[in-house]
Amino acid sequence: MGGFFGAVSGRDIVLDVFFGTDYHSHLGTASAGMAVWDAEKGIERQIHNIGNTPFRTKFEGDLPGFSGTCGIGCVSDSDPQPLVFQLRNGMVALATVGVVNNAEELVKTHFLDHGRYFTTLSNGKINVTDLVAGLVNEKEDMVEGIKYASDMIEGSMSMLFMTGPYEIIACRDKKGRLSIHIGKNHEGYCVSFESFAYSKLSYEDCYELGPGEVVRVTKDGFETLSPPGEEMKICAFLWAYYGYPNSNYEGVNVELMRYRNGIIMAKDERARGTLPDVDFVAGIPDSGVPHAIGYANASGKPFARPLIKYTPTWYRSFMPANQGMRNQIAKMKQIPIPELIEGMRLLFVDDSIVRGTQLRETVEFLYSSGAKEVHMRSACPPIMYSCKFLNFSRNESEMDLLARRTVQALEGDEGQKHLDEYSDPSTERGKCLLKAICDELGFDSLGYQTIDGLLDAIGLDRDKVCTYCWTGKE
Ligand code: SF4
């Protein structure tokens, strides 16, 4: 994943871009960059590795060297960016968020087959932002080039171009899997993945781009250069897991969606008679917590926090390459409160269950700390398919997914033909899946939110929401 922020104004925007980009730090853990355009000095750009150090710490030393009326910044899980290019239409700085599943094929057909070289990253991977710029540059008109790049790319791609000291051009990915907002204050405009990123910078909500829409933003206003497409498939996981609680997407707030989701889960369980008698309802921090508050409120069981995340230093998800180190960090982040665990019957709500590795360790830890019962609820249905649009679940193979692995263990290849049934807890296969996962991870009981419940909690027209991870339907 990743996120970006840009601003264009009648005054210097360096601090707006600095703080606005910093508010996207939860979306990317590898690298970050800022590029600022000063009408006299031109473009100043810096990129830093943020693997072990927060965005602000890395960039505050650069601030004295930056000045300008237009700027963009981004955090990224993959390529270093923004990159600066000389395109047919002039110089631009570009930041992207997305995944290009056919990158190698595009490099071959658009560059290598025509005798043109293409620069790769030092690790041999294709720099996706570089590829996007190359595709945009295939067309004489920049907007045509942006649309062409969007059409060629399999996956999803949102783009943020700084095209001059007074202009930004933004394009939301073709199916609107992620979001782009425009904010406005009395001196100019900003463009942002996260809507909350600009509210503290005195910008007000102004506009949310539609799927595939291309918009030009200046200090005086914005205009649509290419209209939005009809079809939208915004990612349901924005609300369930990785969006920040203060964010709104398509007018739906993340935190409130999570409360509703928990309420729906508890009400469904009450109706089915599966609500366990527990001492506390708790959330796996951070994103499980609001789902758990909703669940506790609707179940009548008290909410408590037996596990607290140590936010002063483990403030976000570091991603060291070494798996052992990742496990160690996962363990170090969550600190227990023994008085809320010993002898207690606990029901935990997690945002989702992907591979189950960390959850197993958490449950073992809770039992070893004296918990009497541990019941687990997932705020999403069982994940059956890897995300091919945003690279969300990062699995080498779908068999890394706990639910798929369990289906294979239960029924072999035949089971893979009945994933719909396995996803439905009212079927025999669905019950078998729940029992097998309960046994494997050591829960006293397990429940998953249904796809209907999740979509009700989001509240948008169902056709507009991507649920591919759970249904396999595009
Ligand atoms: S497949 Fe899943 S993670 Fe990917 S966009 Fe769709 S809902 Fe989001």
Image (spheres, helix red, strand yellow):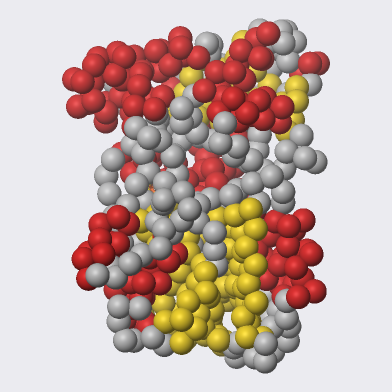
Horizontal arrangement in the rendering, residue 343 relative to residue 267 (left or right): right
Q: At which x and y percent is residue 92?
A: 50, 80
Query: Residue 304 appears in which quarter of the rendering?
Result: top right
Residue 349 visible, this orientation: no
Above-or-below relation of 191 to 352? below
Q: Residue at x 27, y 44 (%)?
A: 473
Residue 16 lies, with reference to residue 401, above or below; the image says below
Q: Nearer the viewer, residue 19 or 258?
A: 19
Q: Residue at x 73, y 81 (%)?
A: 67
In the depicted structure, whether residue 103 falls above or below residue 427: below
Residue 332 x %, y % = 72, 27
Q: Residue at x 39, y 28 (%)?
A: 401
Nearest to the observer: residue 278 or residue 136: 136
Find residue 78 and report its horizontal and vertical position in percent: 50, 52
Residue at x 49% of width, y 24% of height: 356
Displayed quadrant of residue 162: bottom right
- Left or right: 33 in relation to 238: right
Percent position (x, y) of residue 22? 68, 60
Q: Is residue 381 left or right of residue 217?
A: left
**Mark count:** 0
Say if residue 398 shows up in the picture: yes
